[in-house]
């Protein structure tokens, strides 16, 4: 398992967190902790099934920025 830290921009409320978490869960992310107030995300995923680019693309496709 790989653990990464990301900064997500454009989140305004708890619903934004939930939308991203649901999308990442559907993608196959094992664990996801997001705080809309700070924009910080800690994501755990299986590198053999998923990569960072796919995770970023998934978040960006919902209209959020990823750093």
Image (cartoon, grey):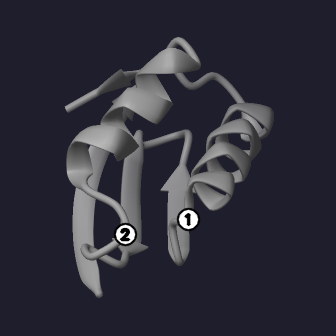
Q: Nearer the viewer, residue 5 or 22?
A: 22
Find residue 31 and report its horizontal and vertical position in percent. Answer: 53, 76
Q: Residue at x 56, y 40 (%)?
A: 36
- Kindly report the distance in space between the C-alpha atoms of the residues bearing marks 2 and 1: 8 Å
Q: Residue at x 41, y 39 (%)?
A: 39
User: Residue placed farthest to the top in the image?
Assistant: 63
Picture quadrant of residue 17: top right
Above/below status of 32 relative to 57: below
Q: Are marks 2 and 1 in contact (CB under 8 Å)?
A: yes
For the C terminus, the image quarter is top left
- The reply to whether residue 64 is visible in this rendering is no
Pointer 1 local density, CA inside 10 Å: few below 14, some 14–19, many at least 20: some
Picture quadrant of residue 43: bottom left
Find residue 16 and report its horizontal and vertical position in percent. Answer: 69, 32
Find numbered disc 2 in the image and state the secondary structure of the residue it sits on. Answer: loop
Find residue 46 and report its horizontal and vertical position in percent. Answer: 35, 78
In the image, is 55 to the left or to the right of 16? Answer: left
- The reply to whether residue 7 is visible in this rendering is yes
Picture quadrant of residue 49: bottom left
Find numbered disc 1 in the image and state the secondary structure of the residue it sits on. Answer: loop
- First in sequence: mark 2 or mark 1? 1
Find residue 48 and report its horizontal and vertical position in percent. Answer: 27, 76
Above/below status of 54 relative to 21: above
Q: Which residue, given by chain and number where applicable, does mark 2 sit on?
A: 49
Q: Which mark is residue 28?
A: 1
Q: Nearer the viewer, mark 2 or mark 1?
A: 2
Above/below status of 42 relative to 1: above
In the image, is 51 to the left or to the right of 26? Answer: left
Q: Nearer the viewer, residue 36 or 42?
A: 42
Q: Residue at x 38, y 45 (%)?
A: 55
Above/below status of 7 relative to 63: below
């Amino acid at each position: 398992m790989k653990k990464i830290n990301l900064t997500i921009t454009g989140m305004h409320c708890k619903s934004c967190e939930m939308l991203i978490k649901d999308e990442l869960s559907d993608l196959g992310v094992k664990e996801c902790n997001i705080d809309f107030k700070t924009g910080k995300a800690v994501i755990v995923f299986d590198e053999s099934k998923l990569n960072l680019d796919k995770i970023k693309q998934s978040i960006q496709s919902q209209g959020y920025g990823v750093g």
